[in-house]
Amino acid sequence: MYDLAVRDDTLRLLASGLSIGEASRQTGVSTNTIRRWRDSPVSDSPLIRTCARCASRPQTPAPADSYIHLLGLYLGDGHIVACPKGVYLLSIYCDDRWPGLIEEAAITMAQVMPTSVISRRHRNGCTEVKSLSKHWPHLFPQHGPGKKHDRPIVLEPWQREIVSAHPGRFVRGLIHSDGWRGTNRVRRALPSGVRWYEYPRYHFKNESPDILALCGEALDLLGVAWRFNNRNELSVARREAVELLDLHVGPKY
């Protein structure tokens, strides 16, 4: 007899895309037992609770605030790649200058897909936070062939409901992945001489007009004033708007 922890660990491996033989080699559980667990899962099995969208009555991914934060990270600077055996790899690329954001991305990914192992791979100047699962396209139906800015990016109605409930978390994911908070310096020529003014501002840059529009819509929900300062970049620069956005996004760390 195996305890529930062994069963759950084994079924998580299957849910992540491993074969029965591979799961058997990693856990020491016989292939016949694994096959029985797979074919006759109990109600709390990881194979059942791994994806809210796969249920007979699809549910909203939980926790909703973590999910919508991860959606922002994915739309900003992430991608999903098809792997063998129907498994998909979700990768979020994080700048090594911000170790706190790397840790937050890993925690958020684990909260959304607790049955999958979260791993990291160091690359040139950045860290790839990644997770394998058969269910990432179900949670992120914006996945598709090619680059995101070469195809329409449209949220499903259930995703829009989550954005409406947690716009700050969505914007946090977008800006922490593909935006920044910095200081703008402006030169003014006055009768008394040249003066320089400094003020903080946020930028979000993305080649997809659809993703830029989604960011703008979420900022509107927060009551944050913004404008386009380039065809592929929006800016939040008014003092009260920056202070309000700080409450939801805050500086990178």
Image (cartoon, rainbow, N blue to C red):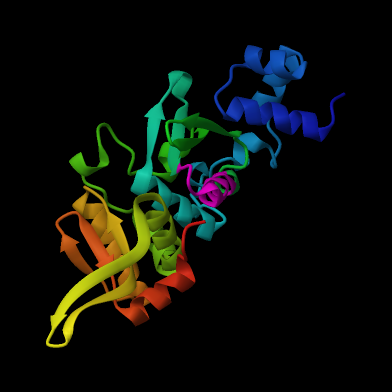
Q: Is residue 71 visible?
A: yes
Say if 63 sits above or below 117 in the image.
below
Question: Looking at the image, which is closer to me, 48 or 84?
Answer: 84
Rendered residue at 37%/37% (across/down) = 79
Within the image, what quadrant is residue 228 found in? Answer: bottom left
State the image coordinates of residue 172 (x, y, percent, origin top left): 43, 60
Position of 231 compared to 148: left or right?
left
Q: Is the magenta stretch mostly helix, strand or loop?
A: helix
Question: Looking at the image, which is closer to me, 56 or 25?
Answer: 25
Position of 112 compared to 168: left or right?
right
Say if 142 sits above or below 204 in the image.
above
Say if 126 sits above or below 174 in the image.
above
Rendered residue at 58%/40% (across/down) = 50
Q: Is residue 133 visible?
A: no
Say if 55 sits above or below 91 in the image.
below
Q: How many labels does the image show?
A: 0
State the image coordinates of residue 93 (x, y, percent, origin top left): 43, 40
Question: Looking at the image, which is closer to me, 31 or 76?
Answer: 76
Question: Looking at the image, which is closer to me, 195 or 212?
Answer: 195
Rendered residue at 50%/49% (across/down) = 98
State the image coordinates of residue 232 (x, y, percent, origin top left): 19, 54
Position of 233 compared to 199: left or right?
left
Position of 48 compared to 135: left or right?
right
Give the magenta part as a residue range: 95-109
Which quarter of the image is occupied by the N terminus?
Answer: top right
Outermost residue toward the front? 193
Residue 102 sits inside the magenta stretch: yes
State the image coordinates of residue 82 (x, y, percent, origin top left): 39, 26
